[in-house]
Image (tube, rainbow, N blue to C red):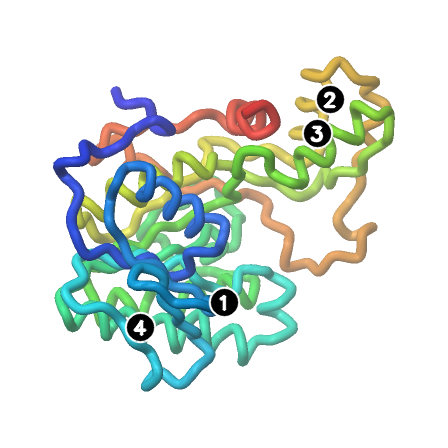
Amino acid sequence: MIPFATYSLPQSETRQGLLLVGADGVIGSALATCLRQAGTPFFATSRRVQQPTAQLLPLDLQADPASWSLPAGLGTAYLCAAVCRLDQCRREPEHSYQINVERMVLLAERLAAEGCFIVFLSTNRVFDGRQPHVAADAPYSPTSEYGRQKASAEQRLLAACPQTAIVRLSKVLPANDALLQGWKNDLLQGRAIQPFHDVVMAPVALSSVVSLLRLIGERRQGGIWQITALQDISYAEAARQICSHLGCDPALVQARSYRDAGLHEEIYLQHSTLEVSRLQRDLGLTLPSAQAVIEMTVNP
């Protein structure tokens, strides 16, 4: 059985003509670093490019699509760009819909028409979270504007580009995640923290997500892929785990409700896990527990 977070492809299996859209985001930048370290050539795009190069290209999904300039002969494209914040999508539904659905689908269609394999990042929020371990083929049931946009994009992409790989993600935690590291620092300084007891996550390590994306892209395996931890953990439980590991006073963890923080109801999911058996069945990949991901994030 292959350890999930450490799997990497043999360099001989890599393909030429990779495109990474949204290379300055959390996942995009990590994937770019991984490809660079493996010696895999790729093109990267960002809307923030000031000085384009042969490999770093400007691409603004808000701009007129006629202005988009893409390399020819691409084999695989990773579509990592998106408006991901729940509150921004709720406050700016038309703007975020244009980027997350209209322009993203148009870009995918153009690339697919040239024979490019598409890897599209989606979310567990295409479901309402009433049940754990939701199957990949379950009916859509989003409860947030962001989830509705991703569900719409999925449907349109699969209709227009049937070979697309949809990768649904839960909470992705990079090493030294800012929130968890902030808790760690506060606890070590004897300062109280107030994590939410009624917001859950089924965290996956950023390194695991990058490994999965590389493998799907290289093997050009389409369909719906889901990656979450096998169980949920509340933010308060995660904070208590960190506190216990550090040997700090448990009284410093003062759990509260997201409602007390004035956050919108969209943040709430009773469950955030998805059914992930395809990872093991088709790829032989295993997932660390939620607790193990928290440990790896705080102590990379």
Q: CA distance from mark 1 to mark 4?
A: 18 Å
Where is the C terminus found, in terms of image quarters? top right
Viewer-nearest of labels 2 and 1?
Answer: 1
Q: Position of residue 164 (x, y in %)?
A: 23, 59
Point out the tag, 3 or 1, that comes first from the N-terminus: 1
User: At 54% across and 80% down in the image, what residue appears?
Assistant: 94
Q: Amino acid at mark 4?
A: Leu
Q: Which residue is disc 3 drawn over? A: 239
Q: CA distance from mark 3 to mark 1?
A: 35 Å
Element assignment for label 4: helix
Q: Which residue is disc 4 drawn over? A: 107
Q: Nearer the viewer, residue 192 or 229?
A: 192
Question: Do the residues under discs 2 and 1 have CB atoms within 8 angstroms?
Answer: no
User: At 67% across and 33% down in the image, what residue appears?
Assistant: 181
Question: Do the residues under discs 2 and 3 have CB atoms within 8 angstroms?
Answer: yes
Q: Position of residue 179 (x, y in %)?
A: 67, 40
Q: Which residue is disc 1 drawn over? A: 48
Identify the image quadrant of residue 37.
top left
Residue 143 in the figure: left or right of residue 80: right
Q: Which residue is disc 2 drawn over? A: 243
Where is the N terminus found, in terms of image quarters? top left
Q: Few, some or many C-alpha atoms within 10 Å of disc 1 (few <14, some 14-19, many ≥20)?
A: few
Q: Is residue 195 above or below residue 110?
A: above
Q: Position of residue 226 (x, y in %)?
A: 36, 44
Element assignment for label 1: loop
